[in-house]
Amino acid sequence: MPIKRITFDAVRKIGLALPHVSESTTYGSPCLKLRGKLLTCLAVHKSADPGSLAVRIDFSQRAQLIAADPNTYYLTDHYVDYPVVLVRLSRIHLDALRDLLGMSWQFVSATARKGKRTLRRRKNF
């Protein structure tokens, strides 16, 4: 059975259902942000395959996803140092996309909380 083609409209619908997520743009491309922090966007760097999504996740989760399904999840040299996995929208199932955006939401949320604690400590000195 062929996979139904996923578009950014589906990404938008799933992402905007998550708490505190809003739509924006980055580098002229549509993206979703969690309280102003990038969650996901269409991959715009020339090294990414056309129709790919860049999704922020933890480095260890990224490695697991790529190892489990390298036809769907991948990485290029440009993205190696960033906590991002590239996703071929033509290959991902809707349920997997929902799970991935949930993982991204948790990662970005945790990262934002850590940053706030660091800022508070610095203000006290």
Image (cartoon, rainbow, N blue to C red):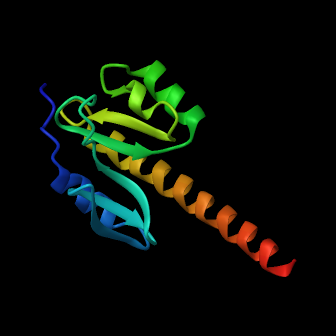
Task: Determine whether 2 is above or below 17 in the image.
Answer: above
Considering every residue shown, the one lying at the far bottom of the view is 124
Q: Between residues 87 and 94, which one lies in front from this camera angle?
A: 87
Image location of residue 52, percent across then percent down: 24, 37
Side of 22 relative to 65 (left or right): left
Where 106 sits versus 44, above or below? Answer: below
Could you tell me residue 80's position as x and y percent?
48, 30
Could you tell me which residue is drawn at 15 percent across and 47 percent down?
7
**Which residue is depicted at the point 35% across and 49% down?**
98
Measured as percent of width and height from the top left, residue 120 is found at: 76, 76
Which of the image's four quarters has the C terminus? Answer: bottom right
The quadrant where residue 5 appears: top left
In this rendering, the answer to whether 5 lies above or below 11 is above
Q: Measuring from the top left, give residue 16's x and y in whole percent.
A: 31, 67
- Residue at point 31%, 26% (across, down): 72
Give me the residue at 40% from left, 31% from top: 78
Residue at the limit of the structure toward the front, as seen here: 125
Closer to the camera in the image, 3 or 12: 12
Q: Quadrant of residue 89?
A: top left
Q: Is residue 21 left or right of residue 28?
A: right
